[in-house]
Image: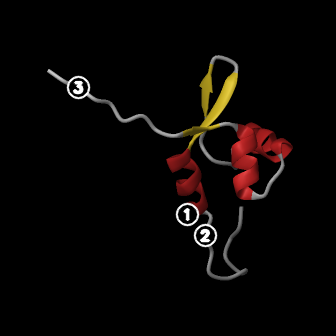
């Protein structure tokens, strides 16, 4: 029996910051105040699933500036 598993792509906070055009400090603050993408703690390391970062981007998409922004 051959079993295969599909693992999610995990990004560190530097990769996420670079992708989003933000600083690493922004990643840290957004984790603290709960405004950023979902994250995973692996021991002391913080990782982000690529799918969670994309979902966060989609959830923060707006069509105009009068929408209630967080």
Circles 1, 3 touching at the beta carbon (< 8 Å):
no
- Tag on residue 58? 1
Q: Is residue 56 left or right of residue 25?
A: left
Tell me residue 7's x, y (percent): 42, 34
Q: CA distance from mark 1 to mark 3?
A: 33 Å
Write the residue at 68% across / 24% down.
45
Q: CA distance from mark 2 to mark 1?
A: 5 Å
Q: Secondary structure at mark 3?
A: loop
Among the two numbered marks 3 and 2 on one chain, the one whose residue lies closer to the N terminus: 3
Q: Which residue is mark 3?
A: 3
In the picture, the quarter occupied by the N terminus is top left
- For disc 1, the neighbor class at 10 Å (few under 14, some 14 to 19, many from 20) is few
Q: Is residue 29 left or right of residue 12?
A: right
Circles 2, 1 touching at the beta carbon (< 8 Å):
yes
Write the residue at 72% across / 39% down.
13
Above or below 50: residue 45: above
Q: Which residue is mark 2?
A: 61
Q: Is residue 24 left or right of residue 52?
A: right
**Between 4 and 21, which is closer to the camera in this rendering?**
4
Write the residue at 76% across / 43% down.
27
Above or below 8: residue 16: below
Tell me residue 4's x, y (percent): 28, 29
Tell me residue 55's x, y (percent): 53, 55
Question: From the viewer's perspective, is the residue at label 3 or at label 2 nearer?
Answer: 3
């Amino acid at each position: 029996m051959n079993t295969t598993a599909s693992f999610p792509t995990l990004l560190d906070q530097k990769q996420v910051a670079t992708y989003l055009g933000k600083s690493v400090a922004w990643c840290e603050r957004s984790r603290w105040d709960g405004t950023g993408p979902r994250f995973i703690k692996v021991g002391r390391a913080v990782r982000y699933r690529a799918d969670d970062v994309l979902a966060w981007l989609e959830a923060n998409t707006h069509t105009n500036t009068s929408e209630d922004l967080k």
